Image: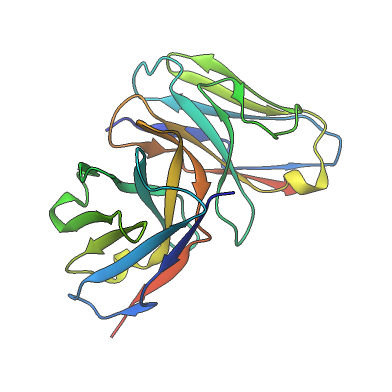
Amino acid sequence: DIQMTQSPSSVSASVGDSVTVTCQASQDIGTWVAWYQQRPGNAPKILIYAASTLQTGVPSRFSGSGSGTAFTLTISSLQPEDFATYYCQQAFAFPLTLGGGTQVEIK
Amino acid sequence: QETLQESGPGLVKPSETLSLTCTVSSGSISNFYWSWIRQPPGKGLEWIGYVHHSGTTDYNPSLKSRVTMSVDTAKNQFSLKLSSVTAADTAVYYCARPLWSGAPYYMDVWGKGTTVTVSS
């Protein structure tokens, strides 16, 4: 299985800050990566797919980049509704695997 | 807008079989690969597997010996069965639909999730 290692596991930030979450794949997966946001008690919501394509309706303050084994999710100018847990997922091979999550907390 | 709704028992005894159904509303079950994903309390997400409307399946090897997925096109539903459950199978179970028909890669539409507890 392809391992997806996310860091940090948690980060504290203030409204208006920029936050970057990284995801490292255990092998080259091209750009087969998605990012999800999960608020407490809710199902995940897809933000980005194919490493950098913003899903329809997702605010432009979210962006993704990377290829091969290293990927990043950047949230510029954090808003109150962005405090949540974020997961990366690889779609290069089955089984689909996800990172352990990054909790973005209010400082 | 298409919605998914999981249903099934919230409590299952150890060694028994967990059975869940996902009902697809305002959309067709055809042409998509439908996934099940679970999340143990306080932990991350684990992909369990998918079932295509044709009946084709693919399961996570970590669960493959215990998982069966099926689809009922007449009812617009698909199902998950997980046998010989233990406390480690306690989780919120989600059903999900990918972004594109014909490609089970990225999950776009999710059910709200249903909590299943394994306990005697």
Position of A101 relative to A41 (above/below): above
Is residue B72 placed above or below A78 in the rendered structure? below
Q: Nearer the viewer, residue B77 or A93?
A: B77
Q: Residue at coordinates 37% horizontally, 56% vertically from top-left? A: B76
Residue A10 placement, left or right of B75: right
Whether residue B73 sits left or right of residue A101 in the image: it is left
In this rendering, does residue A107 appear at all?
no
Q: Position of residue A18 (x, y in %)?
A: 78, 29
Total numbered badges shown on the rendered structure: 0
Q: Residue at x 64, y 53 (%)?
A: A39
Answer yes or no: is residue A76 visible: yes
> Quick one: which residue is furthest to the left in this view?
B65
Query: Which one is in front, A39 or B51?
Result: B51
With respect to residue A18, does B54 lie above or below?
below
For the point 83% across and 41% down, which residue is it? A14
If the image is split into quadrants, where does the C terminus of chain B sit? bottom left
- Comparing A104 with B54, the one in front is B54
